[in-house]
């Protein structure tokens, strides 16, 4: 699986909102400025996040977006799924449960892809926005790349 640009931008936008210490709504323009994201695309992403119940919006003067839940109640998995759909490695189907495979190696690979997607879902669901806020502020170590990935 590859995290899409939408998933990355959505995560960056919500992290920006979580890093904002005020309770006031943050305008799309301010989020775009802070994150370096293109404002028109960001507006579409924020609408999707609003539809998923991750942000709320306020119209008019002083309007903008706020998190709909506490940062500890929003996971990276929630954010990515909200804009990209379910976290999967592909649309391969499920392995046969009775051991009968139509093609050589098909069932074992389907099981591997499903297991790998489940590991990714669990990992993204274990990372909450408040964890990312602490990392961004230097209060917690950043994840390290796997050994040998230089």
Image (tube, rainbow, N blue to C red):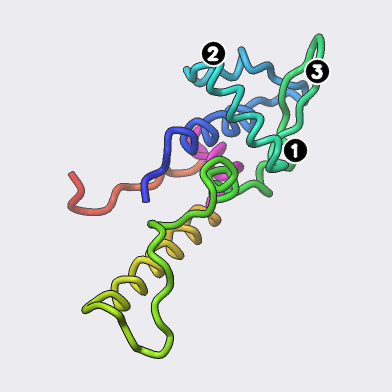
Q: Which residue is mark 1?
A: 68
Judge by depth and name the residue closer to the eye, 71 or 76: 76
Residue drawn at (55%, 55%), measured in percent from left and top? 125
Asked which secondary structure carries label 1, the reply is: loop
In the image, 56: left or right of 89? right
x and y, in percent, of residue 128 in the image: 58, 48
x and y, in percent, of residue 4 in the image: 42, 39
From mark 2 to mark 3, how far is it between C-alphas?
19 Å
Q: Which residue is mark 2?
A: 33
Q: Nearer the N terminus, badge 1 or badge 3?
A: 3
Label 1 crowd bin: few (<14), some (14–19), many (20+), radius 10 Å: some
Residue drawn at (60%, 48%), measured in percent from left and top? 78
Q: Which residue is mark 3?
A: 59
**70 w.r.t. 119: above or below:** above
From mark 1 to mark 2, how far is it between C-alphas?
21 Å
Using the rendered view, name the quadrant where residue 50 is placed.
Answer: top right
In the image, 4: left or right of 59? left
Range of magenta residues: 127-139
Q: Nearer the N terminus, badge 2 or badge 3?
A: 2
């Amino acid at each position: 699986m590859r995290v899409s640009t939408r998933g990355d931008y959505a995560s960056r936008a919500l992290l920006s909102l979580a890093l904002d210490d005020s309770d006031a709504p943050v305008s799309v323009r301010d989020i775009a400025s802070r994150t370096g994201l293109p404002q028109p695309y960001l507006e579409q992403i924020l609408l999707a996040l609003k539809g998923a119940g991750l942000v709320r919006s306020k119209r008019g003067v002083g309007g903008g977006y706020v998190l709909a839940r506490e940062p500890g109640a929003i996971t990276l998995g929630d954010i990515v799924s909200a804009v990209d759909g379910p976290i999967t490695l592909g649309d391969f189907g499920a392995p046969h449960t009775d051991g009968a495979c139509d093609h050589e190696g098909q069932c074992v690979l389907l099981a591997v892809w499903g297991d790998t997607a489940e590991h990714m879902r669990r990992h993204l669901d274990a990372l909450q926005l408040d964890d990312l806020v602490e990392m961004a502020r230097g209060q917690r170590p950043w994840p390290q790349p796997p050994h040998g990935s230089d």
